[in-house]
Image (tube, rainbow, N blue to C red):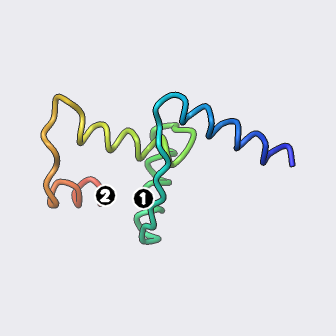
Amino acid sequence: MASTQRKVAQRRQLRDNGYKQLEVWLPRNVVERIDEMKDTLGAESRNEVLLRLIEGTLGENRLPADRAQLELRMQ
C-alpha cells in the first residue's frame, strides 16, 4: 500500500513539474538494448535512458533524427 501511495505522489510531482506520462510498447530486443545502455550510463531507470536519447535527438540544438539515425542508435 505504501508503494502505491509513493507512486501516486511521484507521478503527481512529475505532472506538477511539467511532465506527461507516455506508455510505449517496444520489441523485447529494443528493451534489452535500453537495459544495456542503462547499465553503461549508470542510469537509474529505463525512463532516464529514453529521456536522454530523446533529448539528444530532439533537443533545441539538433535536427530531428531520420529513421536511419534512430536505427543506428538502437543497434
The amino acid type found where label 2 is placed reads Met
Res 55 → quadrant: top left
- Residue 18 point in image, percent of width and height: 46, 32
The residue sitting at 31% across, 58% down in the picture is 74
Looking at the image, is 14 positioned above or below residue 32? Answer: above
In the image shown, does 11 or 71 lie closer to the viewer?
11
The residue sitting at 20% across, 30% down in the picture is 60
In the image shown, does 8 or 69 lie closer to the viewer?
8
Res 59 → quadrant: top left
**Farthest-out residue, right:** 1
The amino acid type found where label 1 is placed reads Arg
- Quadrant of the drawing holding the C terminus: bottom left
> Quick one: label 2 or label 1, which is nearer the N terminus?
1
- Residue 27 point in image, percent of width and height: 42, 71
* Residue 74 badge: 2
The residue sitting at 45% across, 67% down in the picture is 25
Circles 2, 1 touching at the beta carbon (< 8 Å): yes
State how far apart marks 2 and 1 are (Cα): 7 Å
In the image shown, does 30 or 10 lie closer to the viewer?
10
- Residue 57 point in image, percent of width and height: 24, 42
Give the left or right position of residue 30, taking residue 2 as reference.
left
Q: Which type of secondary structure does the marked residue at label 2 adopt? A: loop
* Residue 33 badge: 1
